Image: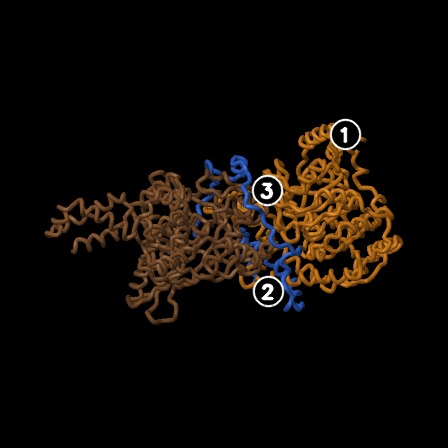
Chain colours: A brown, B blue, C orange
Amino acid sequence: MKYEAVIGIECHVELKTASKMFCGCANRFGAEPNTLICPVCLGMPGALPVPNAAAIEYMIRAGLAFQAAIPEYSKFDRKNYFYPDMPKNYQISQYDMPLTQGGVVRYWLEDGTLRECRLTRIHLEEDTGKSTHAGSGDGRIAGSSYSLVDFNRAGVPLMECVSEPDLRSAEEAVGFLEMLRRTLMAIGVSDVKMEEGSLRCDANVSIRPVGSEAYGTKTEIKNMNSFRSVRRAIESEIARQSAMLDAGERIVQETLGWDEANGTTISMRSKELAHDYRYFPDPDLVPMEITQERVAAVRAKMPPLPIERFERYTREYGFNVKQATQLIDAPEIADFFDRSVTVSKQPQQTQNFVLGDLSRLANESGTPIQQSPVTPEHLGELVALVESKTINSKIAKELLARMWAGEGSPKSIVEREGLAQTSDPAAVARFVDEVLAANAASVEEYRAGKTNVFGFLVGAVMKSSRGKADPAAVNALLRERLGG
Amino acid sequence: MSSENLDIAYVAKLARIALTDDEVARFGAQLGDLLGHVATLADLDLESIPATAQVVESRNVVREDLERASLDRETVLSGAPQRQGAFVRVPRIIGQA
Amino acid sequence: MNGRERSARELIDATLARIENVEPQVGAYLSVLEREARERADALDKRIAAGERFPLAGVPLAVKDNLVLEGTVTTCGSRMLERWVAPYTASAVQSMLSAGAIPVGKANMDEFAMGSSCENSALGVTRNPYDLERVPGGSSGGSAASVAAHEATIALGSDTGGSIREPAAFCNLVGFKPTYGRISRYGLIAFASSLDQIGPLTRTVEDAALAYDAMAGFDPMDSTSVDRAVEPTAGALREDLRGVRIGVVKQFDTHKLGADIDDVYDRALHDLEALGAEIVEVELPTADYGLATYYLIAPAECSSNLARFDGVRYGLRVDGADVAEMNERSRAAGFGPEVKRRILIGTYALSSGYYDAYYVRAQKARTLVARDFAKAFESCDLIAAPAASSPAFRFKSKSDPYSMYLMDYYTIPMSLAGLPALSVPCGWVTPEDGKRPMPLGLQLTAPLFAERPLLAAAHAYERATTHAAKHPTQIAEVAR
């Protein structure tokens, strides 16, 4: 392809506060229509907005998570336009002094390559109500004869996140979005579910000849309802624009709706003049002052970020992309894992246990891992015991089950019952020689060439030592004794 | 700051108020007149003067993220000009937001 | 009150009878709350009998019809809300209720608080009780007329550029606008958010002080309300003005207002001096820019505040082929000409290409006005000025919008700076086009948050001069 795609993403993320942005109505998805409303969010005469402290805190968290600048002063502005699901016919938003500026989303592709997409800004605003369009037969606005409005969603706190046009493919766009989603979930500010509307996004797409610095004409794609749609829509649009340029046609700057069913973009009628939003500072709200101390306090409480984990897991621990992603996308398990590793110092082993036997025990008993009776530290201890060859992996499995049943730390069980395995050469030699003496026939068979007897002899030593002999030492000594 | 650029018909569209031709003419004249009066602000040297954001210097007036009771739906919908079941009904919407 | 002289019910019954008697002439109310008032009075009497005490027990209260009171039709004097029943109560009104006051009616007003004569009401005509052929002032015209005609003891009004002070002056009353942010705006249907304030209209300064004490204070429902301790004013009224420096503004030359009016204000200054005040000259160099500044900022904010009136969720709806047409027709039918004018000019002042030249510029000029006052208050404690440039005028005598805007000339600068200001009766003149003496108001302004010394001084002046008592209303003669 001789064209390079230039893509920017604009998303809206609903914050999962308990109450709405400017009033105390519940912030809840799926309630009966028009039951979560009050004079404020309904835009009734005389009502006034009061900002939700938690929403502002969440914004600071998001800004920190993406290394954005958090200016000392910020304010709300009114964005004025008429729309029936916007109760005041202005949206309280932020114009020239948003809560965060700049920032970068570092994300990874399927093959583990790390990429970066800069952010222009993240600002805070209120969501609108929801209209459903009736009378046209397909729920679409075009051709409908009337609309029904539900104001439950009006006033829900909304984070608007605008990226720079740094993305170069549909794959990158989806990688960016997944990272955004992962991170916002990890810091606990949103459920980020496209199917519930808590994440909505639009893509700006243009193409230009490879090597060109100038931007081509961009189109805006809306109505993508899943990450899959985003990928398909962007790929479709890149193809469409490429074909047009190849045919010598000009790209028209317009808004396109993605039609998932038919896999195409549709031009949305834009008879309207470009909106004049008449932004001005909202006189019903006072400015916000965010001090360094406040930002530091939020930073101190931040949980581990997915990108930090990814780098640690892939670079330091040597996990592949799939393993790393699997852990990161299960943050409670990753939390458990991280704490275990600080004790065990054995990432791969620990991961095996956590995602293997421990997860199995958790699933079988329906226990979420945060409530595991085995603490992360004790699991780390267990792994360390295996690594130091104090016990072998078979014993370790048994121990884990006993720890899950509440018998205490692995060290305490091992000491109490003397389960430490023996790698003491004298002790191992004793067991080996006992078995060899008792199985002279098998020894003969082995020396005669029947090498699969070896396994039987190893098993016999393990049995005779009640599993405590170090299998590696047994192996080595047996080979030596058998002379093969 | 001249008043010749006051396109009343355009402003009325922005403000979603249907004006009669008579009103367009009358308001155009009256508001042109007013703009003539406010033109005196051009006399002031405002170069280094900050715009008043708020008369009183409050900062960070916020509320705790607590749920409060909402209004009763019937109370609200019964006051709506047109409702359909649990919804407020409006004529069709042409064009996007 | 508190049950010592009369019961609340008796007081309310008497007021309702008076209302029935004089309303046909005065037209102060858009709705009278007969049943509700009697019910509240009875309930209050029970609580007093049980030992509770209330600072404003049983006081008949007129509520300007841009203040929501749950269950009452709240119209803002507009067809747009002609039948709208408020589902909640304004915080300030609630405070008055908690203090024992009893709303007897919703008072007429210029539509959406835009006007200086009450002639812009789409729903009724209110007449000045002192001369029924003259306006009561505006926009709190009904509030003023109701108290002047003894149809209420206290009225709540709202003031954006003078809408409490001017009608109070026109109707021989005390009209008080506190510092911006002192009284919650939650439930006050917004005109210009950064200027609107609720305040009382009363027959005495003491009543105004009592009402202010009941309402002032931080409200968590209004983030522009100020979180600052309120020093009660009713107990701090004084009888003299010794040690008080009163500034007279050089730019407010009352000679321009005609000999009769000039004499009244001259006399007022002498009376202040006789009480011990020192009169000093101060300057407000940007006073003349107040009107231009105000008539850009207020319409800009109102154009946004009134966008919510679109026929969708409440209020008047006129149908259309689509939502936009429905909005346009509803607003065309619901709003009167003055409201339309202000929405249009406000929309223009905020629009792309004009925002910096108009709105931002006006907000900068506003800063200068505030600085002028701050400087003036370095050499005085209070500023004295006329409340209006003339007494109440005859109906329909100001047909040109700008001539009406000029009525706010003396009151706008204080609003722009957010300062506490009040009007107190200071004398009478008989206008050339009339036969009856009409009252004039002395406007006193104090620095931010200085309500206490302001009311204290106004009380001293009122007690020493007793201007208000000099002439009766016209109703006294006609109503029999």
Name which quarter of the figure residue A416 lies in. top left
Q: Is residue A351 visible?
A: yes
The chain that hosts pointer 1 is: C
Residue at x 83% of width, y 45% of height: C468
Question: Which of labels 2 and 1 is toward the front?
Answer: 1
Q: Is residue A229 visible?
A: no
Badge 2 and badge 3 in a common chain: yes
Residue underneath mark 3: C81
Residue at x 22% of width, y 49% of height: A432
| Left or right placement of residue C95 versus residue C440 in this view | left
The chain that hosts pointer 3 is: C
Q: Is residue C473 above or below residue A321?
A: above
Name which quarter of the figure residue A169 lies in. bottom left
Marks 2/1: CA–CA distance = 59 Å
| Left or right placement of residue C321 versus residue A444 in this view | right
Please report whichever mark, 2 or 3, sits nearer to the chain's N-terminal start: 3
Kind of residue indicated by mark 1 = Ser
Residue underneath mark 2: C357
Please report whichever mark, 1 or 3, sits nearer to the chain's N-terminal start: 1
Q: How packed is label 1: few (under 14 Cα within 10 Å), some, or many (20 or more)?
A: many
Kind of residue indicated by mark 2 = Ala
Question: Which of labels 2 and 3 is toward the front?
Answer: 2
Residue at x 80% of width, y 52% of height: C442
Marks 2/1 in contact by CB < 8 Å: the verdict is no
Question: Callout 2: helix, strand or loop?
Answer: helix
